[in-house]
Image (tube, rainbow, N blue to C red):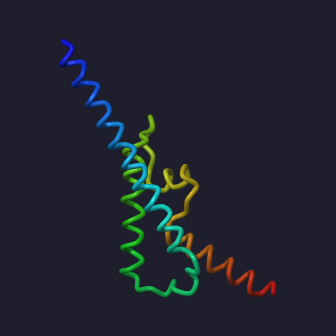
Amino acid sequence: MKFVADMSANIIIIIVVIIIIIIIIIIIIIEYAFKLEYSSNVWSSVTSTDAEKLDRLQQKLVALCQYLFPTNVHVTYEGFLTCLKLLALHNRRLFLDALFLFLSVQV
């Protein structure tokens, strides 16, 4: 009986460690994504295939967050972005371009 209790405690510890590693990976990916947005108005003329690849990466990350932090109701991709207080990649780049233009005109 003690062996089974020790084994289940070890399994719980392994699961907790795996969850912590996944959360650290998510944080690293989010930080990298924010670094990609630095001066995005300069490099935003990337090809549409590159933009689609970045958008798919964001969709996969959001899907992973939905899996790790499930809600009781079905939430769409856009709805979950709203919960995370994020914009879709295309909309975020448009916003940053408009902000750059506004700040350039202000000076």
The vertical placement of 19 against 12, above or below, is below
Name the side, left or right, on which 23 lies relative to 1.
right
The vertical placement of 31 against 53, above or below, is above
Considering depth in this image, is 12 or 82 the residue closer to the camera? 12
Name the side, left or right, on which 27 lies relative to 19.
right
Measured from the top left, where is residue 11 in percent x and y? 26, 31
Query: Could you say which quadrant of the image residue 58 lies in?
Result: bottom left
Query: Could you say which quadrant of the image residue 85 lies in?
Result: bottom right
Q: Which residue is painted at 49% across and 87% down in the image?
A: 45
Q: Which residue is painted at 62% across and 80% down in the image?
A: 97
The vertical placement of 40 against 59, above or below, is below
Measured from the top left, where is residue 72 in percent x and y? 44, 34
The vertical placement of 46 against 73, above or below, is below
Q: Residue furthest top?
A: 1
Q: Which residue is painted at 56% across and 87% down in the image?
A: 42
Q: How many numbered discs?
A: 0
**In the rendered view of the protein, which quadrant contains the N terminus?**
top left
Query: Could you say which quadrant of the image residue 41 lies in?
Result: bottom right
**In the rendered view of the protein, which quadrant contains the C terminus?**
bottom right
Considering depth in this image, is 91 or 11 the residue closer to the camera? 11
Measured from the top left, where is residue 2 in percent x and y? 21, 14
Name the side, left or right, on which 25 lies relative to 94.
left
Measured from the top left, where is residue 34 in percent x and y? 53, 68
